[in-house]
Amino acid sequence: MGIADVRRFNRTVTQRIGALNDAYMSRDRPLGQARVLWEIGPDGCDVRALRARLDLDSGYLSRLLRVLENDGLVEVKQSGDDGRVRIARLTEHGRTERAVLDQRSDELAESILDPLSERQRQRLITAMGEVERLLIASTVQIGIVDPRRPEAKFCVQSYFEELGTRFDGGFDQARTISADVDELTLPAGLLLVATLHAEPVGCGGLKFHAGEPAEVKRMWVSPDVRGLGLGRRLLTELEKQASARGTAVLRLETNRSLTEAIALYRAAGYVEVEAFNDEPYAHHWFEKRLAE
């Protein structure tokens, strides 16, 4: 399963970057405090966004911020616009400390690269990039979401906007076959939303028809996370959801300009068939029989 390999890799990385030291980067604070200080950034940060970005428990983040406040590095205040929103900002001392951490981080990176040959450096940097992409991919979460929720609306609207830029002649939502909130709500259908650090980055829906094939709708992946295999993950999860509800066949249609989607469907075992609806924006119709 590779579990031992992952654990060995984790031990090597944490030791090499100094994560085990109480004084990270030879400063008077551990890695957790240093990372929060860095992520707050020069412009400040919403505490809720900070927690989501770092995947930290709210209680633990509060303790980290309290320590940084007591050290005179950070100020946490309520937003003037919304009392429920707290903003963390660096003090002048905090900005100075962050600049030192920035310099020390460059020095640490240099110490890792210096002993290696040029060929080894390129291999390491390439491998780091691949590991980063795969770790990000493993962080994405997918679940059924009420299509009325803000994250669902964001994904669907982003989907419509992208179609408008990619289709010849644009895209008019009123002309396409419907997949409204009621049709994407169980038992009529469902909507999956993918999130990364609590931010929506993709979606895919199903419309069920009693005794008939179900339809895949609203497949969209944010440009920020493309190349991570998220489209395939969404499609696979849609197939699982459909199969669990007794669906034997899935259908979908797509536009010729969506070449990545067409390649995905074909690679996933969808077979091109004759048109089964009158979708005005479709040029290709696909079908797949699900395994029992």
Image (tube, helix red, strand yellow):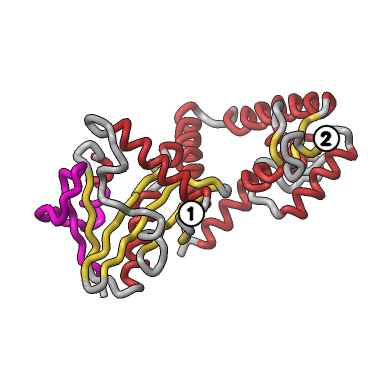
Q: Examine the structure image and report whether residue 177 is included in the region drawn in magenta.
A: no
Nearest to N terminus: mark 1 or mark 2: 2
Instruction: Tell me if residue 289 comes above or below residue 172 in the rendering.
Output: below
Say the numbered circle drawn on residue 148. 1
Q: Nearer the viewer, residue 64 or 101?
A: 64
Q: Which residue is mark 2?
A: 75
Give the structural element (helix, strand or loop) at label 1. loop
Compared across the picture, whether 71 is left or right of 251 comes to right
Which amino acid, mark 1? Answer: Arg
Q: Examine the structure image and report whether residue 289 is included in the region drawn in magenta.
A: yes
- Check disc 2: other Cα within 10 Å, few if <14, some if 14-19, many if 20+: some
Which amino acid, mark 2? Answer: Glu
Label 1 with label 2: CB-CB less than 8 Å:
no
The magenta segment: 263-291
Compared across the picture, whether 224 is left or right of 239 comes to right
**Residue sitting at 51 percent across and 42 percent down?**
132
Give the structural element (helix, strand or loop) at label 2. strand
**Residue sitting at 22 percent across and 73 percent down?**
211
Q: Quadrant of residue 274?
A: bottom left
Give the quadrant of the C terminus: bottom left
Compared across the picture, whether 260 is left or right of 237 comes to left
